[in-house]
Amino acid sequence: MKKFFLFMSILLCSLVVLSGNVKAAEKKSGKYCYEVIDKKKRTAAITHVSNAGSTVKIPKKIKGYTVVQIGRMEGNTGSIFSEEDTVKVKDLKLPATLRKIGVKAFKGCGNLKTIDFPKGLRYIGARAMEKCCQIKKVVLPKELKSIGSYAFYHCEAMEKAVFKTNKANIGRYTFATWPVSDGGTSHLKKIEMPVTYKGKLMDCAFAGYCAETFTWGNFTAENGAFLKNLTQLKKIIIHKKAKKVDIPRECLDACAKQLEIVVPKNVSSVYVGQQRYNIKQITLYGMDTVLEGDYSMGIGDKHNMISAETIKCKKKSMAWEMAKNYLCPDFTNADWELIYDNMYSEKNIEFKKVNLVEL
């Protein structure tokens, strides 16, 4: 028992010392609080700015350390500004040395109208720009590798997002203003991305996109349902330089009911995953384009399922021959509880033949 109490005493003392070290790690210089990231490389992170006015300039260096980060990359941290100062910030100048923007770093800067990300920026943390509701445009630099979930959540004035990067992983609900029940509105009608985009896109990443058309490029096959809940989307146009197109399961849910997908002739194959709402029409212009659906899905081994009511293509094309065997879910008398659990089978949903139309 004595040994146990001695052990607990030592452990408690260690925790106190460690706690003291964490507090001591944050230093202050003028109105900036900062933490040293790497002593050898002489790098630091700005963790707090006090007495912020309408214009805030983050320095390149602080006490001989190069500023490479703003805020903290992990944990449930808050804005680098106080609640009172957050609403004062209208102009934010970031240093060229910046590589990381931390979790919630600029959350709630509701009067911030523009932000220029430096070319060398690599990471934007979760909720970093949440509710910066007056920003109209963002340009995401070439070196960017990751954008955290909800990073631009409820940035309702945003009209355009330009991706210079082709490799950044984009988290869940990054550009979302959904659901409308939370007061969400959106003006995002332009998303410019490289044709070949290698980064992974998570569920509902673009749920704030409100244009009627979206251009689909060569995205990675590992993507989630990143276009889910686009209630105003009517047409997906496959880019003419795209080769192999993979539209993940559920990617077009809550927008596919009225949706048309247009596939140019040079595309080698298109996979359209299981949706919980049918796509109105898929139009294919190529003779050799392979159109793929989900194999079997509980409806027998001889048929593929594709969530499309009509397939329009040239007679004797590859797609025409394949579409003859496709069945489409009929949700008229469907058990929606089972559907939302992704339980597609002949027991809980009916199927109908795809309407095949000659182009």
Image (cartoon, rainbow, N blue to C red):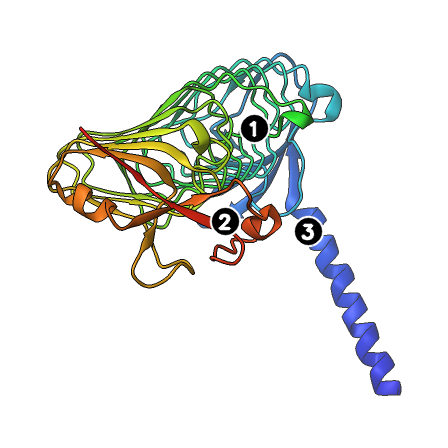
The three-letter code of the residue at mark 1 reads Met
Placement of 118 over or under 149, stated as above or below: above
Along the viewing direction, whichever of 249 and 126 lies nearer the viewer = 249
Q: Are marks 1 and 3 in contact (CB under 8 Å)?
A: no
Left or right side of 52 for 208: left
Q: Earlier in the sequence, mark 1 or mark 3?
A: 3
Q: Is residue 329 above or below residue 84?
A: below
Task: Report helix, strand or loop for mark 3.
Answer: helix
Q: Position of residue 282 (x, y in %)?
A: 29, 33
Residue hosting label 1: 129
Look at the picture and state if 318 lies above or below 229.
below
Is 104 displayed left or right of 245 in the figure? right
**Residue underneath mark 3:** 22
Measured in 3D between alpha carbons, the distance from the residue under mark 3 to the one under mark 2, in whole angstroms, is 16 Å
The reply to whether discs 3 and 2 touch (Cβ–Cβ < 8 Å) is: no
The amino acid at mark 3 is Val
Label 2 secondary element: loop
Q: Can residue 31 be seen?
A: no
